[in-house]
Amino acid sequence: MAGGRKQTGIRRSDRLFDIIQIMRDGALHTARDLANHLEVSERTIWRDMATLRASGVPVEGERGVGYMISAPITLPPMNLTMGELEALHLAVAILGEATDPDLSKSAQSLAAKIDAVLPENAGPPSTGWGFAVYPFADAAAGFKHMPLLRDAVREKKLIRMTYLSLDDQVSTRLIRPLQLEYWGRVWTMTAWCELRNDFRVFRVDRIETLIDTGASFKDEDGKNLQDYLAKVDADMRHGPTTAV
């Protein structure tokens, strides 16, 4: 497939972003041309177009004819640092809680537009979490933990935390933080859990307490980020992963 960027291992959210960049020219693009350029199937392009439409991107067209963006997307491509994403997230969260209904509505509209063009990190939840999905207060709740978590990922620090699961069960975990993932409204942390002796993905806003144990960990076969990603890939082919 000459002329296309190799898509092996490329996240779906990144591919959606690539499609938007290609279609910014306002021209008609066939599913076959897009599929050849991105090295995916036409069926994948059909699904991507449905996703973009559902996200509010002004895509027009149909199978067998082609697709085009019917209105300009004025938000430029973003390449933000983790700190910048946190600042943007928090600012929109604050405005979304404003008592001025017009300001609150505008903040949520802005959030939806950001979601449509901002590449997000991949992770286990298949439906994705956008700015408009969870209450802003819930999304902002985890920010106090981010400095320690970022440092723990970077410096390989063992962390002890109290966690409230999605079914409201409280547990104390000793974890090896491996990666922070951003979903537009919610941050998650991939970690090796010493309690479960397995990988787990935690929502940062569900963490109640977080303590640096003062100990560090070394990469071990079967417990590092590469092993987790390989497990996710296998589970996507053969069955679901365990969520908490």
Image (cartoon, rainbow, N blue to C red):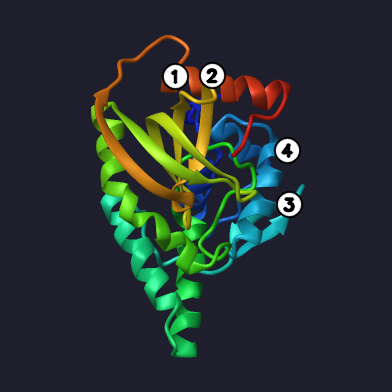
Q: Report the Cα–Cα distance between label 2 and label 1.
A: 6 Å
The answer to whether mark 2 and mark 4 are in CB contact below 8 A is: no
Q: Amino acid at mark 1?
A: Gln
The kind of residue on which mark 3 rests is: Val
Report x, y in % for residue 123.
53, 37
Q: Indicate the secondary structure of the residue bearing disc 3.
A: loop
Say which label, 2 or 3, has the lower sequence index: 3
Foreground residue, 215 or 41? 215
The mark nearer the N terminus, 3 or 1, is: 3
Residue at the location (41% across, 67% down)? 74
Residue 226: mark in rendering: 1
The nearer-to-camera label among 2 and 4 is 2
Residue that badge 2 annotates: 230
**Residue on which disc 3 sits:** 65
> Mark 2 or mark 3, which is nearer to you?
2
- Please report whichever mark, 3 or 4, sits nearer to the chain's N-terminal start: 4
Query: What residue would you read off at disc 4?
Result: 43
Identity of the amino acid at label 4?
Arg
Looking at the rendering, which quadrant does residue 121 occupy? top left
Amino acid type, callout 2? Ala
N-terminal of the pair, mark 1 or mark 4, is 4
Q: Is residue 74 visible?
A: yes
